[in-house]
Amino acid sequence: MKRTIIYLIIVGSTMDVERGIFYWQPGPGFVGRYRLVFIKKDSHGRATRKDIIVEILIQSSSSR
C-alpha cells in the first residue's frame, strides 16, 4: 500500500481522504480571495490538478 501525504496549509481546514471532501471554516480575518490547489494521483501515479478560487466577503450587520 502506498502512503498518501496531505499538506493542509489553511488554518481551520481538514480533508476527508476517503470521501474526497475538503472542509474549511475560515476564522476571523480570513477575508479576500484564496486560491486552493488540490492534487490527486491515480493508481498509475498520474497527477491531476484542480485549482479552486474562493472569495470571502465581509457580511454587513444589516444583512444578518
Image (tube, helix red, strand yellow):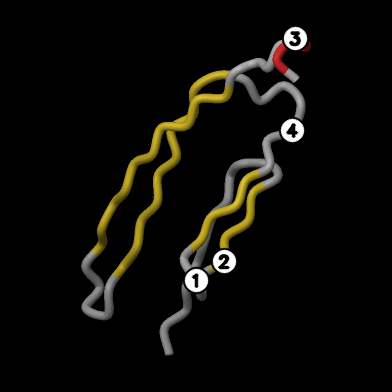
Estimate how packed mark 3 is, as few (under 14), some (14 to 19) or many (20 or more) residues with alpha carbons within 10 Å: few
Give, as a three-letter code, the residue at label 3: Ser
Q: Which residue lies furthest to the bottom in this view?
A: 1
Give, as a three-letter code, the residue at label 4: Gly
* Residue identified by numbered label 3: 62
Q: Is residue 55 left or right of residue 48?
A: right
Residue at position x 53%, y 55% in the image? 22
Which quarter of the figure is the N terminus placed in? Answer: bottom left
For the residue pair 2 and 48, the one nearer the viewer reads as 48
Residue at position x 44%, y 40% in the image? 36
* Residue identified by numbered label 2: 16
Q: How far apart are marks 3 and 4 (CA)?
A: 21 Å
Give, as a three-letter code, the residue at label 2: Asp
Q: How far apart are marks 3 and 1 (CA)?
A: 37 Å
Percent across and percent down for residue 45 are 25, 73
Estimate how packed mark 2 is, as few (under 14), some (14 to 19) or many (20 or more) residues with alpha carbons within 10 Å: few
Asked whether disc 2 touches disc 3, contact meaning CB atoms under 8 Å apart, the reply is no
* Residue identified by numbered label 1: 19
Q: In this view, does 11 lie to the left or right of 53?
A: right
Name the secondary structure under disc 4.
Answer: loop
Estimate how packed mark 1 is, as few (under 14), some (14 to 19) or many (20 or more) residues with alpha carbons within 10 Å: few
Tag shown at residue 27: 4
Asked whether disc 1 touches disc 2, contact meaning CB atoms under 8 Å apart, the reply is yes
**Label located before the other in sequence (3 or 4):** 4
Percent across and percent down for residue 35 are 43, 33
Which quarter of the figure is the C terminus placed in? Answer: top right
